[in-house]
Image: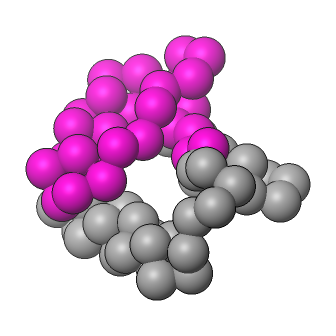
Amino acid sequence: FNPRGKGLFCAFDLDSGEKRDKLRGLIQEEGAIMLGCGVKTIRFRPPVNISKDEIDIGIECIRRAIKRL
């Protein structure tokens, strides 16, 4: 997955753009909006005023989506 980030800016790669698009859609179905970036990357760029609870919800959406992938 190659997770990386600095501050609140985070990203991770998947094996292919097709898999990235599928996971991005699943994350959205789980209730979070993540953006695609480059060929096979998903990025997370929340607003500066995001709360810890909102970050936890987003991470849980990613976890549930990965299990469905």
State left or right for residue 4 relative to residue 60.
right
- How does the figure colour the protein chain or chains? one colour
Viewer-side residue, 69 vs 59? 59
Q: Is residue 34 magenta?
A: yes
What residue lies at 79% left-to-right and 53% top-to-bottom? 5
User: Residue 29 colored magenta?
Assistant: yes
As drawn, 25 above or below 21: below
Residue 23 visible to the viewer: no
Q: Quadrant of residue 21?
A: top left
Is residue 11 visible to the viewer in this orientation of the structure?
yes
Total labels drawn: 0
Give coordinates of residue 4: x percent, y percent: 76, 53
> Along the line of sight, which residue is nearer the eye, 43 or 20?
43
Residue that lies at the very extreme toward the right in this rendered image: 6
Residue at 55 percent of width and 75 percent of height: 51
Query: x and y percent of residue 30 in the render?
Result: 18, 59
Task: Please report the bounds of the magenta region as a residue range.
Answer: 16-45
Left or right of 66 in this view: 4: right
Query: Which residue is at 57% across, 64% downward?
Result: 50
Image x and y of residue 36, in percent: 47, 27
Instruction: Tell me the residue at 86%/54% (across/down).
Output: 6
Residue 64 rendering spot, x and y as whole percentages: 25, 70
